[in-house]
Amino acid sequence: METIRVEDLSKSYGKNQALSEVGFAARPGTVLGLLGPNGSGKTTTVRILSTLLRADSGRAWIDGHDVAEQPHLVRAAIGLTGQYAAVDDDLSGRHNLELIGRLLGLPRAAARGRADELIQRFQLEDAASRMAKTYSGGMRRRLDVAASLVGRPSVLFLDEPTTGLDPRSRTEVWTLVRELVADGVTVLLTTQYLEEADHLANDLVVLDQGKVVATGTPTELKARVGGLALQVRIEDPSRCAQAAAYVAAATGAEATVDEDTGLIGAPAGDTAALRQLTERLEAAGISFFELGLRQATLDEVFLELTGHRSRQTADAPDAVTAGAAERNAR
């Protein structure tokens, strides 16, 4: 039985179709990555599943409970960590967690015990008595995730959980996610950091313009665009456009140019593309520093499926209301 099941969800904001017949499922104790560019509907999907927003049509279930018909049972089964930390800056870490426990109906002693348990688990002992506004970004995010777990949810929604975090703090959040999954929690992760999805997700759903354009494991999606990527770095930057055209011709896919590294690349269906590109470059007299094949990245999958690269921003149609929704999520 799927922990999360979504069938034909649709939602409009005025004339803007945010979701159109979206469907997917998540297995128990796994991470389902929900990917998509600006305005694809990721946050709208999370808000519907977490009972903060009603769909116009379609159905969804969390732990077998109908999201629209049994919202009270769904809320008891889920936790939500949004794009922005929802902790009270003027309370200590411990008091934030105790407050959540009391709001969830725990007796005072039970709320205090659960707060202490989470403080230890998330390694916040040294800062537990300090006001949250003194916390670093990584500590605030750990506290935010801890607050989402006070009610012991079986399903956790992580909506862009590492946005704005430095690499070290992001790695800390990744470790927390792995630990939660090891404990049997099902995680729905929305992210535009494709490296993050590649590291954490067991299964992926790619949204574009409110529709599901692909589903599968990271390996399956990479194989969908050939599984390999052809890349070259030439000596003469003035001939980049010409080299990119040769890469596109050899692979049959749009070539991209990384302005920072000078690398030109595109998904490749097989090793024949390497031979074809080598011949074209040599015939044109274009010298190169490096040329080779590597495994395709999710960023290249994203480009192939949506027509553009990932961006580190929130869903445009969701952004107006997302902040208010997250503040009320718990």
Image: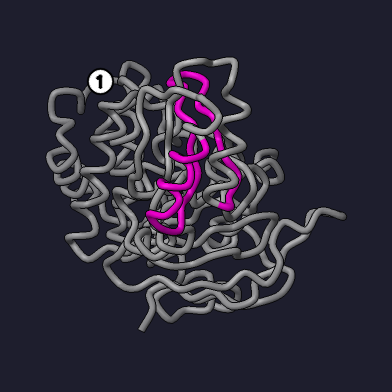
Quick one: SS at disc 1? loop
Say how many tags the image has. 1
Q: Is residue 182 left or right of residue 289?
A: left
The residue that appears at 49% across and 67% down in the rendered structure is: 215
Image coordinates of residue 249 in percent, x first then y, are 59, 46
Instruction: Give the percent coordinates (x, y) of residue 142.
Output: 28, 36
Name the residue located 24 percent from the left edge and 59 percent from the top edge.
181
Residue 275 is covered by the magenta coloring: yes
**Going 12% across and 39% down the picture, which residue do you hit?**
120
Nearer-the-camera pick, 50 or 210: 210
Q: Looking at the image, which is closer to me, 101 or 326?
A: 326
Q: Splitting the image into 4 quarters, where does residue 194 fall?
A: top left
Q: Quadrant location of the N terminus?
A: bottom left
Colour pattern? one colour
Q: Where is residue 288 in the image (x, y as percent from the top left)?
A: 41, 24
The residue labelled by disc 1 is 130
Say what amino acid the circle numbered 1 marks. Answer: Arg
Query: Furthest-front residue in view?
Result: 283
Query: x, y (%) of residue 252?
Result: 58, 53
Q: In the picture shown, does residue 131 fall above or below 292?
A: above
The answer to whether one can see residue 74 in this image is: yes
Vertical arrangement, residue 86 with respect to residue 151, above or below: above
Whether 167 is among the magenta residues is: no
Left or right placement of residue 84 versus residue 155 in this view: right
Q: What is the magenta range?
A: 252-280
